[in-house]
Image: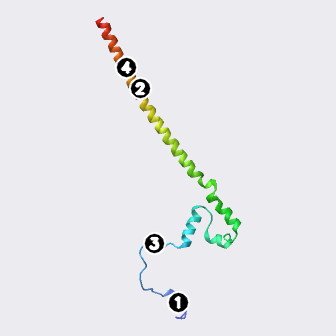
């Protein structure tokens, strides 16, 4: 292989300098790909090959799932479940507290009445 050919230079290259520390910087394409993956719209390179970005109706159809009622359904269900759980726990705690208070009050009243009746019966 001739010494001036690019493959030979690339093979024997010893670059000077240092790589920057940390992860590589995020590019615009990386952010777009992350969003597309999150919402399951497809891969960026595939969408570019198919020309979907230039077809307004197809792109609108794919993006409509992000803003329609189905997009918020999972969040709404989560909030409803959380509220129901909180109300059930609160109702259970309140019922237990009320039952304990009522039982304590009833036992105290009954003990007082019985002590009064017994004292009256013994002295009378």
Q: Dot 3, how many residues are within 10 Å of its Cα: few (below 14), some (14-19), or many (20+)?
A: few
The image quadrant of residue 48 is bottom right
Residue at x-position 64% and y-position 56%: 68
Would residue 91 appear left or right of 121 to someone viewing this image?
Answer: right
Colouring rule applied to residues: rainbow
Q: Nearer the viewer, mark 3 or mark 1?
A: 3
Nearer to me, 16 or 87: 87
Q: Nearer the viewer, mark 3 or mark 2?
A: 2
Q: Dot 1, how many residues are within 10 Å of its Cα: few (below 14), some (14-19), or many (20+)?
A: few
**If you read the primary sequence from the N terminus, does the residue marked by circle 4 or circle 1 appear first?**
1
**If you read the primary sequence from the N terminus, does the residue marked by circle 3 or circle 1 appear first?**
1
- Which residue has dot 4 on it? 109
Rendering coords of residue 72 (x, y %)? 59, 53
Q: Are marks 3 and 1 in contact (CB under 8 Å)?
A: no
Would residue 79 appear left or right of 67 to someone viewing this image?
Answer: left
**If you read the primary sequence from the N terminus, does the residue marked by circle 4 or circle 2 appear first?**
2
- Which residue has dot 2 on it? 102
Q: Nearer the viewer, mark 2 or mark 1?
A: 2
Q: Nearer the viewer, mark 4 or mark 1?
A: 4
Q: Is residue 46 above or below residue 72?
A: below
CA distance for labels 3 and 2 = 64 Å
- Which residue has dot 1 on it? 8
CA distance for labels 3 and 4 = 73 Å
Q: Are marks 4 and 1 in contact (CB under 8 Å)?
A: no
Would residue 115 appear left or right of 69 to someone viewing this image?
Answer: left
Rendering coords of residue 105 (x, y %)? 38, 24
Q: Residue furthest top?
A: 124
Q: Are marks 4 and 2 in contact (CB under 8 Å)?
A: no
Nearer to me, 13 or 52: 52
Residue at x-position 66% and y-position 62%: 62
Q: In the rendered image, which quarter contains the C terminus?
A: top left
**If you read the primary sequence from the N terminus, does the residue marked by circle 3 or circle 4 appear first?**
3
């Amino acid at each position: 292989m001739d010494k001036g050919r690019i493959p030979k230079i690339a093979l024997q290259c010893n670059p000077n300098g240092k790589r920057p520390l940390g992860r590589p910087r995020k590019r615009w394409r990386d952010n777009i790909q992350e969003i597309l993956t999150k919402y399951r719209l497809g891969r960026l390179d595939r969408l570019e090959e198919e020309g979907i970005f230039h077809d307004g109706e197809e792109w609108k159809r794919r993006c409509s799932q992000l803003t329609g009622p189905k997009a918020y359904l999972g969040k709404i269900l989560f909030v409803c479940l959380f509220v129901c759980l909180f109300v059930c726990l609160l109702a259970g705690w309140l019922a237990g507290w009320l039952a304990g208070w009522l039982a304590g009050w009833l036992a105290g009243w009954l003990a007082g009445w019985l002590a009064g009746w017994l004292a009256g019966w013994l002295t009378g």
